[in-house]
Amino acid sequence: MHKQIEKYISELFGTAINKPGGKELYSELTDSAISRYEEEIKNGRLPSEAYQLATGAIGDVDALLDSYRIKKRRYSVGFWLTAAAFFISAAVFSASALLHRAYVPLAIGLAALALCCATALIRIKRSSDRRAPLKKAARAIAKAVIIVSAIVSAFSFASIDAYHQIWNYDQSRWIDNIESVSIIRVTHPEEIVDGVLTDGFEYETLVEIDAAEWPDLLEKLGGLRFYQNNKTEPLQYGDICVLIDYTGEPWPYFIYSSTCSARGGKDGPLYNCDYCDKDAFDEIAAPYLK
Amino acid sequence: MSISPDEIRGYTDTIILARLMDGDSYGYEIGKAIRTITGGLYELKEATLYTAFHRMEQAGLISSYWGESEGGARRRYYRVTEKGKLAYSEGVAGWNETKRIISELIERGGIHDA
């Protein structure tokens, strides 16, 4: 029961225990409460009754701490760092989804992680409870695990976000790492069955360009925002398309690969290319748009 | 019937000083003495007691030092200072005066007698 009393008072003190003067005050109150508990036990009280009397006699610890000018934070430094890391990471990930700069949230996440670990280490070092250094260390490690979990959760936003970006065919996305570009001609049209586009088109490859053989391809098409296969306007026989094999940004975005098309009509003018860099498309595909 | 803390709040310091006038003591012992003397009718909460200790020490009414408990653990003892002894005398005198005035005020027929 002594441990329970210590725990009860420890919770009343919160982070104030680690403040100057807080530890001594905590010890004095704990000593008094335990003495009261033992007194009540000697008087024939049941342990539960003695516990209630001992803890009930403690009173308003917040007012006591105020009188000593000991500030008690409701939440620990670790909590605030975790919350900050969580929200900042989530916010930056959202921004990165727009800017497509994965290293920004990665760097911030790692910085937050370093801060959290440093905080945990400082807490261990500053601990005045020399009697139970292992217990303190275990607590600090547990907190660090929670903090890391929160950061990982924040990072998971990126995965979820990337998932929606990659597989949601209604959205257009930036192309990050082009591996190859192919000019193709549709030989079998797509079909719409019950209002749903089937990916059943077939094509012949007119030319395939390896990115490695065209050093400035990435630069040239880096700004090309492709238009994913349109669900309402299927590819027709004879359409000329640019198929781009690409991968997304490196970790923490998981590696993905997909094929998409910017598209030109067989008779000339581009269409369904709302986001295309038309000049880039012309340079690559125009010779075949005849 | 227990005693309402509001009734004697203004005399907390004097009550504590009274206990220390008998000799140095520590928090739990003072709290226990108060409970014993009042037959359990009045109890100073630990937080109130230690708040008073701090206030009185700041005011120079008491001083503290670390000693050892029977079990060998460190324990803070409190000692009344000369200034505290004077404050105690003033507190007792003030209470006696207050007691006399209140008695006169609430005694039946007091107004008619005057």
Image (cartoon, coloured by chain):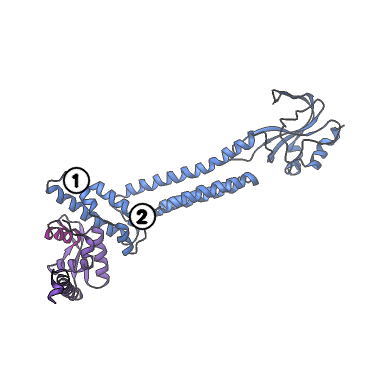
> Spatial distance from mark 1 to mark 2, Cα to Cα?
28 Å
Assess disc 1: are there few (<14), some (14-19) or many (≥20) residues with their C-alpha within 10 Å of its C-alpha: few
The quarter of the picture where the C terminus of chain A appears is top right
Assess disc 2: are there few (<14), some (14-19) or many (≥20) residues with their C-alpha within 10 Å of its C-alpha: some
A282 vs B53, left or right, is: right
Q: Position of residue B59 (x, y in %)?
A: 26, 72
Name the residue type under label 1: Glu
Q: Which residue occupies 60% across, 38% down?
A: A162
Provide the major secondary structure of the magenta segment. helix
Q: Earlier in the sequence, mark 1 or mark 2?
A: 2
Q: Secondary structure at mark 2?
A: helix
Q: Which chain is blue?
A: A
Q: Which chain is purple?
A: B
Q: Are marks 1 and 2 on the same chain?
A: yes
Near-viewer residue (A110 or A94): A94
Q: What are the residue bounds of the magenta stretch? A: B26-41
Query: In the rendered image, which quarter is residue B56 located in?
Result: bottom left
For residue A29, the mark is: none
Near-viewer residue (A152 or A206): A152
Residue B33 within the magenta-colored segment of the rendering: yes
Q: Position of residue A241 (x, y in %)?
A: 78, 32
User: For mark 1, what is the residue?
Assistant: A49
Q: Which residue occupies 69% across, 23% down?
A: A194
Q: Position of residue B63 (x, y in %)?
A: 22, 69
Q: Are marks 1 and 2 in contact (CB under 8 Å)?
A: no
Name the residue type under label 2: Thr
Query: In the rendered image, which quarter is residue A171 located in?
Result: top right
A51 vs A194, left or right, is: left
